[in-house]
Image (spheres, rainbow, N blue to C red):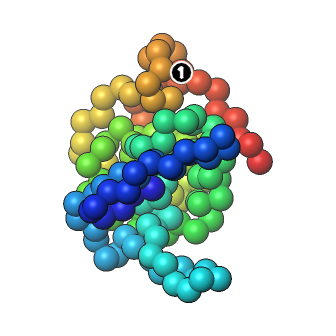
């Protein structure tokens, strides 16, 4: 979970772990209000959530991919371009672009990401973070395919 200061302590039990990360600046456009049983809460937009999953998620690309499959239905291409363009971690944008185009096969969103990284120099990055970087390289996204992506759906 990404939050404002002060950061909360991470939570962990036998079935669940929640890590809290602090982000200094929030763009109002990237935060959306959602209604819950307890009232309204502010959460990151689907586009920003997707990038956070691929940046902070260290518990498996397949878990992130399963969530992405549902998030793409709510994503807006112009919002995705805007957010991906200013997102500081290009590797996460590359991973998202690869997954959206090659695995989910949503060309509309993939084109939005391509627009965001147009003109940037891309360096090869592993699809699965923190693991051995050996595998075939997708030349367009510069993704090292070091894991087989499988959905839990």
Q: Residue at x 64, y 26 (%)?
A: 148
Q: Residue at x 31, y 76 (%)?
A: 28
Q: Is residue 116 visible?
A: no
Question: Where is mark 1, residue-wise?
Answer: 146
Check the picture and name the quadrant holding the N terminus. Answer: bottom left
Which of the 4 quarters of the picture holds residue 6? bottom left
Would residue 12 appear left or right of 56 to someone viewing this image?
right
Q: Residue at x 44, y 48 (%)?
A: 10
Which of the 4 quarters of the picture holds residue 60? top right
Label 1: state its secondary structure: loop
Would residue 74 appear left or right of 25 to someone viewing this image?
right
Question: In the image, is residue 7 above or below residue 94?
Answer: below
Q: Position of residue 103 (x, y in %)?
A: 62, 41
Q: Position of residue 86 (x, y in %)?
A: 26, 57
- Decide which of 76, 45 is in the foreground and name it: 45
Q: Position of residue 78 (x, y in %)?
A: 41, 69
Q: Is residue 12 visible?
A: yes
């Amino acid at each position: 979970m990404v939050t404002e200061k002060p950061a909360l302590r991470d939570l962990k039990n036998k079935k669940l772990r929640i890590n809290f990360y602090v982000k200094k600046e929030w763009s109002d456009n990237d935060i959306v209000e959602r209604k819950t049983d307890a009232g309204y809460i502010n959460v990151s937009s689907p586009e920003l959530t997707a990038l956070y999953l691929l940046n902070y998620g260290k518990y498996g690309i397949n878990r992130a991919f399963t969530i992405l499959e549902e998030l793409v239905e709510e994503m807006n291409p112009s919002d995705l371009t805007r957010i991906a363009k200013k997102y500081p971690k290009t590797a996460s944008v590359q991973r998202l672009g690869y997954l959206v185009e090659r695995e989910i096969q949503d060309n509309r969103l993939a084109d939005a990401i391509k627009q965001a990284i147009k003109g940037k120099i891309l360096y090869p990055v592993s699809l699965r973070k923190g693991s051995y970087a050996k595998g075939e390289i997708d030349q367009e996204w510069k993704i090292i395919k070091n894991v087989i992506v499988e959905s839990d759906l």
